[in-house]
Amino acid sequence: MSVDGAQLWTLNQRLLAVVMDACTEELTELGLETKEFFVLAEVEASPYPAEIATALLLPKASVTVYVRNLVAKGFVRREIDEADLRRHRLVLTAEGTEARDRALAALAAEYDRRLARVTPQDRTELQRILQEMLSPA
């Protein structure tokens, strides 16, 4: 039996969607929409909106809206980049860090709940496979 890459990709997307849907209440309690959460979670790794758009495969205009919302909620602030005064970099506030960490904990708990259905040996193999798929060709 051959394994279709598109089917595997679709299953992975469905799993991610189910986990995110299960965490919607927690995100709402934190004052976050799903895509705002992803932007918030990416700020430390990619402190510039254009980098966030690239990393998350989102249109730059959408990232601009999410960043505005996060700034208005007090989760992110814009700072002038000392290396290039024409640019603003994004920085998480203490509230943003707390919201991000709580949202990540909710996602981890839901993912762990589903992962508990898989044997420890299969989890180790899944981790190995995912790391192999992410490694440079």
Image (cartoon, helix red, strand yellow):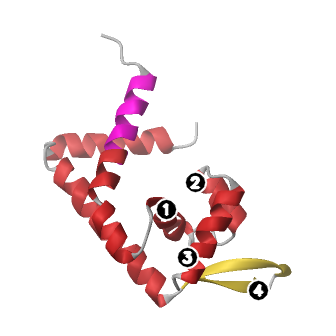
Residue type of the residue flagged with mark 3 = Leu
Do the numbered discs 4 and 2 sit on residues whose CB atoms are within 8 Å?
A: no
Dot 3 alpha-carbon crowd within 10 angstroms: few under 14, some 14 to 19, many 20 or more: many
Q: Earlier in the sequence, mark 1 or mark 3?
A: 1
Which dot, 2 or 3, sits closer to the camera? 3
Q: How far apart are the two marked residues, 1 and 4, measured between alpha carbons?
A: 23 Å
Residue under numbered circle 4: 80
Residue under numbered circle 2: 56
Residue type of the residue flagged with mark 2 = Leu
Residue 77 pos. (x, y %): 62, 84
Helix, strand or loop for disc 4: strand
Q: How far apart are the two marked residues, 3 and 4, measured between alpha carbons?
A: 17 Å
Residue in the image at 26% along x and 55% along y: 22
* Magenta stretch secondary structure, dominant: helix
Q: Earlier in the sequence, mark 3 or mark 4?
A: 3
Residue 15 pos. (x, y %): 32, 42
Q: How far apart are the two marked residues, 4 and 2, measured between alpha carbons?
A: 23 Å
Mark number displayed over residue 70:
3
Q: Which residues are magenta?
A: 5-16
Q: In front here: 30 or 47?
A: 30
For the N terminus, the quadrant is: top left
Do the numbered discs 2 and 1 sit on residues whose CB atoms are within 8 Å?
A: yes
Residue 67 occupies quadrant: bottom right
Q: Is residue 106 left or right of residue 93?
A: left
